[in-house]
Amino acid sequence: MGGRPHGENQFRSRGVRPTLSRVTDLEFYDDPAEFLATAARHLGADPVLNTVVASVTSRARDEDSAGVARPVGVPRWWVAARDAGGEVVGVGMRTATAAPYPLYLLPMPRDAAVGLARALHARVEEATGFNGALPAAEWCAGETARLVGGEARIVQQSRLFELDDLVVPADVPGRLRAATPDDVELALAWFLAFHHDADEQAGRAPTSDPVDLEDRGGMLRRIQGRRVWFWVTEEGQRVNLTGANPPSFGVARVGPVYTPPEHRRRGYPGAAVAEVSRLLLHEGARVCLFTDQANPTSNRIYRQLGFRPLVDMANLLVSRSA
């Protein structure tokens, strides 16, 4: 296995300590609404930690209700682990639309994570990508690697932050404005550039296919929902893009945050995230975001804005032995 993220144990106290609950059942769901009904209490117990599963599943439910077409041939399911008393003690999902369609796991007992790997192997569902909370993602990836005779390694390390007291940067020229449908093409290009630059800056091979990360229809829906903003100069030039997810269980997640290289080192990302966070706070939401641990600049900026680290997470890949 690859090395653990730096500082992992420092933040594991927030809901990610391995639990001793004995899992008796893994329940798979194809319907996001049915899964949310089952897992609502569990997700709401720590909505910041659970933000990705809660927001992605809520969006899937809403898109299903609106009749939005889903990609063909892409796995999509959710799973809930129950203990002997019937309580949900862990959840995960497989909803990514970019190869290798990684699983996303929240904290769960070891036997649940291992059992999930074995269940997928038994039904001949190939899984090579595993994202989410440690150590659950690592347990599932490790068991998968054992079953296929391969190796699991960490390829990206991220950190979840929550906003405490917002500190707004001073003297950054420009203003925040919501994206409009006329901004769709640029917003889509900058979403994709964000993922490319994050991998390049960290010295990683691309961790996903950027073509599948967002489509034009998805971007238009984000913009129409007023979840994409630009920081613009006094001349109206767009110099930063900042997105956010709608609140789910009272939590809104900021991201992505992208500034083109020619506009960097001028304070735009900090100013934009601060203003977006202020809007989200005004809506009554708690605000969180993820950072790439390989990018010390973004980690420093968000700490200065008042974000505090909560938990370390990781993306892992399983490769078969030659």
Image (spheres, rainbow, N blue to C red):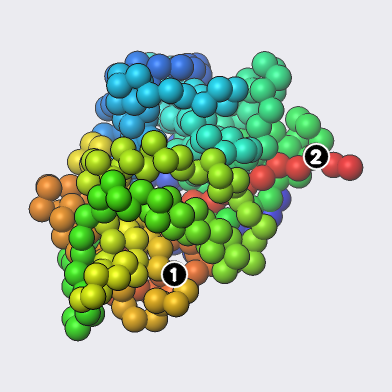
- Quarter of the picture containing the C terminus is top right
Three-letter code for the amino acid on which mark 2 is drawn: Arg
Query: Residue 47: x percent and y percent?
Result: 28, 41
Query: Residue 308: x percent and y percent?
Result: 31, 64
Quadrant of residue 160 in the image?
bottom left
Three-letter code for the amino acid on which mark 1 is drawn: Pro
Could you tell me which residue is drawn at 56 percent across and 48 percent down? 210
Say if residue 102 shows up in the picture: no
Which one is nearer the viewer's eye here, 320 or 63?
Answer: 63
Q: Residues within 10 Å of mark 1 (few under 14, many from 20)?
A: some
Mark in the foreground, 1 or 2: 1
**Above or below, comparing residue 183 to residue 265 in the picture:** above
**Residue 319 relative to residue 52: left or right:** right
The residue that mark 2 highlights is 320
Looking at the rendered structure, the secondary structure element under dot 2 is strand
Could you tell me which residue is drawn at 53 percent across and 34 percent down? 97
The residue that mark 1 highlights is 260
